Amino acid sequence: MTSCSTSVEGDARNMTFGTPSLKIGRCGSLTSLNPWLVPQDRSTEEVPPSREFPTRERARTKVTSPQPGIPTPDVVDRLPRRDAVWPATVWWLGVHGGAGESTLAMLAAGSRPAGHAWPVPTMPGTTHRVVLVARSNYAGISAARLAAIEWASNTLGDVIDLAGLVVIADAPGRTPKPLRDLERVVAGGLPHVWRLPWVDAWRVSPVDSRLPLHKEFRQLFSDLEITTASTPAHH
């Protein structure tokens, strides 16, 4: 009997940007043949069996700034840009509709939603710190990949300081393995990746920043050195 397996080519820690291509494998599962990051030597490396993508995933890579040789994405694949006059501790950039940028802005003091566009500062010499936000489904992770390529190709110059990517669970329960694998690949091209859990209460009621947050949210804000909206300011 033929066994069913799902794999991702290459090691996300040592790759350059490529073109994604997913197809259905022999047993009906998604298989990544040519993921976003492709090994420079084009060789196929065996990927060890994956465990559940950690709820707190901070991908520690050397990709902390745009890289030479990354092709500029087509115009249709780029996020829009808008002038951002106001300061912010962090700009949450939802790479697709419903990503969760407004929710995070309500929870983190001094932060702002970017309105699904790169927040370009209007004052010369100013840099805005940005965190990409995506849901954990295929469309969300793919949109995050495109945004990361746009940043890495250096089309934004030095006005954007990309801190990383927040992936918010799009449903309760375990994330399917093909999506966990794809998340790891995308993580290889970003400074950090944080994964936040599904919050069932927010499905039926408004977000209340006064209520206790899940530890993953607290860790995210701690890593970014920002306080929650419910934390009183010290004077």
Image: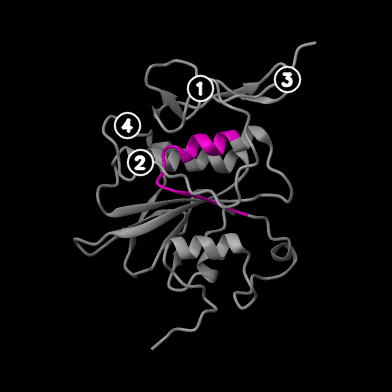
Q: Which residue lies furthest to the right in this view?
A: 1
Mark 4 / mark 1, whichever is N-terminal: 1
Whole-Å distance between the Cαs marked 3 and 4?
Answer: 34 Å
In the depicted structure, whether residue 104 falls above or below residue 16 = below
| Image quadrant in which you'd find residue 179 | top right
Q: Residues within 10 Å of mark 3 (few under 14, many from 20)?
A: few
Q: Position of residue 149 (x, y in %)?
A: 39, 37
Left or right for 108, reference 200: left
Q: How far, Cα to Cα, is label 3 from label 1? A: 19 Å
Classify the position of the N terminus by image quarter: top right
- In-front residue for pair 134/61: 61
In contact (CB < 8 Å): disc 3 and disc 2: no
The alpha-carbon separation of the residues under discs 4 and 1 comes to 16 Å
Quarter holding residue 197: bottom right
Residue displayed at 30% across by 41% down: 66
List the residue tagged with mark 3: 4
* Of callouts 1 and 2, the N-terminal one: 1
Mark 4 residue type: Ile
Q: Does the magenta stretch include residue 83?
A: no
Q: How far apart are marks 3 and 2 (CA)?
A: 33 Å
Give amino acid for label 2. Val
Where is residue 223 drawn, in percent x and y? Answer: 45, 61
Name the residue tied to disc 1: 34
Q: What stretch is highlighted in magenta?
A: 181-196
Q: Which of marks 4 and 2 is nearer the N terminus?
A: 2
Helix, strand or loop status at disc 2: loop
Front-most of 118 and 167?
Answer: 167
Element under disc 3: loop
The residue at which mark 4 appears reads as 70
> Are circles 3 and 1 on residues that touch, CB within 8 Å?
no
